[in-house]
Image (cartoon, rainbow, N blue to C red):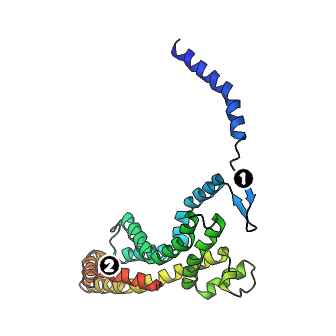
Amino acid sequence: MNGPAILRALTAAALLLLPALVQAQADIPLVTVQPGTGGGNEYSMSLQILLIMTLLTLIPAALITMTSFTRILIVLAILRQALGTAQTPSNQIILGLSLFLSLFIMAPVFEVAWTTALQPYMNESLDFGQALDAAKIPFREFMFSQTRENDLLLFAELGGYDAFATQDDVPMVVLLPSFLTSELKTAFQIGFLMFVPFLIIDLVVAAVLMSMGMMMLSPMLISLPFKLMLFVLIDGWSLIAATLVTSFAV
């Protein structure tokens, strides 16, 4: 038999076997929900794996919205703008530094989530729903500690919610935007205070060049070495990292 004839024969065999394979798959329940002993529901392993894989796809969004990553990234981006070094450090370096500083800051929160939620779930002492509820607790406490009350009240009002008696009554749909808004405010406040010294250097250099009649020379070109020298003398990277870590007070 030549090549096309073999290909046609294999295709015909696959088409003949396809109904049997579909019927075999239909006989295997992939998603089952059974009543649990405590009044809840017990999900099949395939459904639990599907839920876990779905949660894994949401990890980047959770990293941005529920941790210290946003504040650190914005402050480092403003710092690079204040120094006037264009793309130095590169975006990859800023992202990497923001990630590892976030891991350092969030380590206590991750440890609590591991101890109270993930480890008991892996030991089958908690079901998936209980583990998910337990994992939310340390992250909610962290976000509440960094969220301004006026931002929380704003989004509660926008969402049509009544006054919350306790923090446990605040839903995640209100807490997450409130936390992100507070983080943006704090990041820009830190960035403004950090930008002022470098702005003063630019103004002094521009005034000196203007008084010397060197108006065609870019002040940024002259002020850059002075800003770098100042940043190195005060050990700027360590100072910025320490400021960012202590600003969370975890």
Q: Secondary structure at mark 2?
A: helix
Q: Residue 186, percent across and down?
A: 50, 83
* Towards the viewer: 155 or 108: 108
For the point 45% across and 75% down, which residue is it?
107
Q: Quadrant of residue 166?
A: bottom right
**In the displayed structure, would residue 54 be above or below residue 75?**
above
| 241 displayed left or right of 221 | right
Return the mark for residue 13: none
For the point 45% across and 85% down, which residue is it?
247
Give, as a three-letter code, the residue at label 2.
Trp
For the point 71% across and 85% down, which residue is it?
164
Label 1: which residue? Answer: 32
Number of numbered markers: 2
Q: CA distance from mark 2 to mark 1?
A: 54 Å
For the point 55% across and 85% down, which residue is it?
145
Between marks 2 and 1 in the image, the one whose residue lies nearer the viewer:
1
Q: Secondary structure at mark 1?
A: loop
Q: Is residue 181 visible?
A: no
Q: Residue 87, percent across and down?
A: 35, 66
Residue at the extreme top of the image, as rendered: 1
**In the displayed structure, would residue 36 be above or below residue 222?**
above
* Towards the viewer: 40 or 231: 40
Give, as a three-letter code, the residue at label 1.
Thr
* Towards the viewer: 95 or 47: 47
Q: Earlier in the sequence, mark 2 or mark 1?
A: 1
Q: Residues within 10 Å of mark 2 (few under 14, many from 20)?
A: few
Q: Is residue 73 visible?
A: yes
Q: Quadrant of residue 8?
A: top right
| 3 displayed left or right of 82 | right
